[in-house]
Image: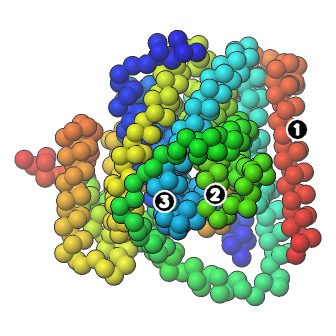
Amino acid sequence: MKDVGFGAALLLLSAGYYALAAALPETRLADATGPDGLPKIYALLLASLSLMLLVRSLRERHGRGDEAATSSRLHPRVRSAAGTLAIGAGYVVLAPWLGYAPALAGLLFTTAWSQRTGGESLGAVAIVSVCGAVFCWVLFVLVMGIPQPPGLWRRLL
Amino acid sequence: MIGSLAAAFSLSMVPAAFGGVTWGILGGALPGISPSITMALLLPFTYGMDPTAAVVLLASSYVGAEYGGSIPAILIRTPGTNAAAATVIDGYAMKEQGKAGEALGISLYSGFVGGLFGLVVLIALARPLSRMALAFTPMAYFALGVLGLSVIASVSGDSLIKGAMSGLVGLIVSTVGTDPVTGLNRFTFGSPQLLSGIPPILVMVGLFAVGELLAQSGEPGWTPATGASVRIRFPSAALWRRIAKPQLIGSVMGTIEGVMPGGGGTISAFLAYNEARRWSRHKEEFGKGSPEGVAAPEAANNTLACTALIPMLSLGIPSSNSSAVLLGGFLIHGLVPGPLLFVQHPDVVNGLYAGLLVANIAMVVVGYLIMMPCLWLVNRPKPYLTAFIYAFVVSGVYSIEASLFHVAVTLGFGVVGYLFRSLGVPLLPMVLGVVLGFMVESNYRRSLALSGGDHLAILRDPIAAALLALALIFLVTSIVRHLSGHERQQARR
């Protein structure tokens, strides 16, 4: 079932990519291949392989009784991964406003808290997160001189 | 050889080598953090560094990670890296017999021997191979890119179709940005940040580091390491003599697998283990705590950390995840591995050799001193470790061009890496596609411009024709080997 989904997704990707390549404007500087030449070949190759995978997977799909059990076992892990990704996305959105250290403290706290195994208290996670963010700020910004998002409040000062 | 190493030696590479080895050992000691992830996490921070120090830092972290992987393998029966899986067998058995310190000492010493062996082979082979490639025309470069892409067939694991699809996705990613011939913007969706394309570094950090973070987020933590008082004990003179042969076997295996595209540390470690058992006078001890069973795979791992750089440095073709990340380190400093690297930047190449020598010495020193911090780190709660690795990823990627857009793109490739892992799709083909895509397209179209649009002109260039023939042979043999393996699997069922 997973391979069917993968094949279908990449078939869609190849179709969309081909359409975008075909829509590239013509240019007088174009060579024999053109800017759309190789992209179209890549799209066609990917579409062919996706179809092969789809056909093979659909043929092999029969007689697999354990698929449902496998996919239901996967759910908590997928949720966990989606949560971790959302934390990163939250950092991207908030860092320009909050600045590096507060946004990083938020990232550290939410990541550690969402993955706690039971032994960590809220206070301990909060303290480690704040200390971790300060450590990273000192290391990257002060010691190594690597720029990080300054945040809105820095601009107001 | 010694003269050029001495000339290339500079004081700035010593902290880079020591820092890289320390980072590598710590990263390698953490189960689930492979050498390539350890290097990918470090990659963005090398952006503002001196190019030689940057590549030495990355290569040294590779060297360190190969040893670091053996620490949890010996202490908690969990290999820190895939390549350390063979070390678990006898390393953990030795630990159960109260010889953990001795096993770690053998691992460290064998890694040092293997690393030096690999460095000598690297220096001996990389430059002659690159000299051959100095006569390359754009047609030959195109063919070289195709040869590099043919590696996909051997690194595709169980499914050749999925490997090829992964490679094509990488090639598609490489077409984003300004067209190399006409200057037309392609697939940028009006975003000025995509005009210069998607930097390979974002793809690598996303696929390897973020993808692994997402995959690990739903996994339980590992068993804490016991024996906090473990002290490394280097082998006695009698043991030195006993493990010399398995070390040589491991070094030879590491050389063969390192030069072969897609060979990988895991294969070389297990091959070395098997061969060491076959040639041993104490076969019966294997699996029950044999020092030779630790020495052979560890020598193989560290030999491979150097020999895997041969195709990458001389031809610009990465043969493993780690060498692909190191290639990314070269690219972000405007250095293009391949024949011209040896002509245009001999200082960087010689500096890398000297840095690797320092790194192997540093591995012994740091490996001995860092035991306690390593154990402390391995015993930290996994949620904190995950959170700090995440913090390093977002901080490092932002620092490349002070761009949160880059962080978002990296997270996007993290999702791709996570999905590919979950679906059993190999990641290296995609990296190869991203890294080699531009080389293939720009040189193909340049060849057409030179030949007046004659596609067959490529076949009339002797070097290009030879490389394409080699790619074809490589592709066909990989497919045949894959199909015969598939048939054997079917027959077993």
**Residue under circle 1?**
B473
Q: Position of residue B25 (x, y in %)?
A: 44, 48
Q: Earlier in the sequence, mark 2 or mark 1?
A: 2
Residue shown at 54% from the left, 81% from the top: A75
User: Relative to the observer, which residue lies in front, A60 or A19?
Assistant: A60
- Residue B63 vs residue B89, the one in the foreground: B89
**Three-letter residue code for mark 3:** Ala
Query: Which of the pair B286/B55 is nearer the observer?
Result: B286
> Which marked residue is nearer to the observer: mark 2 or mark 1?
2
Tag 3 and tag 1 share a subunit: yes
Left or right? Give the position of B485 relative to B47.
right
Query: Badge 3, how many Cα within 10 Å: few under 14, some, many 20+?
Result: many
Say whether disc 3 or disc 2 marks the residue closer to the N-terminus: 3
Mark 3 and mark 1 lie on one chain; the one further toward the N terminus is: 3
How far apart, in angstroms, are the residues tagged by discs 3 and 2?
12 Å
Residue under label 2: B290
Same chain for labels 2 and 1? Say yes or no. Answer: yes
Residue B341 vs residue B217: left or right?
Answer: right
Residue indicated by mark 3: B100
Would residue A125 be seen by someone viewing this image from the given angle?
yes
Q: Residue at x 80, y 18 (%)?
A: B452
Q: Closer to the observer: label 3 or label 1?
A: 3
Q: CA distance from mark 2 to mark 1?
A: 41 Å
Report whether residue B209 is seen.
Answer: no
Q: Is residue B410 above or below residue A60?
A: above
Which amino acid is tagged 2? Ser
- Mark 2: few, some, or many residues within 10 Å (few <14, many ≥20)? many
The chain containing the residue under callout 3 comes to B
Chain under numbered label 1: B
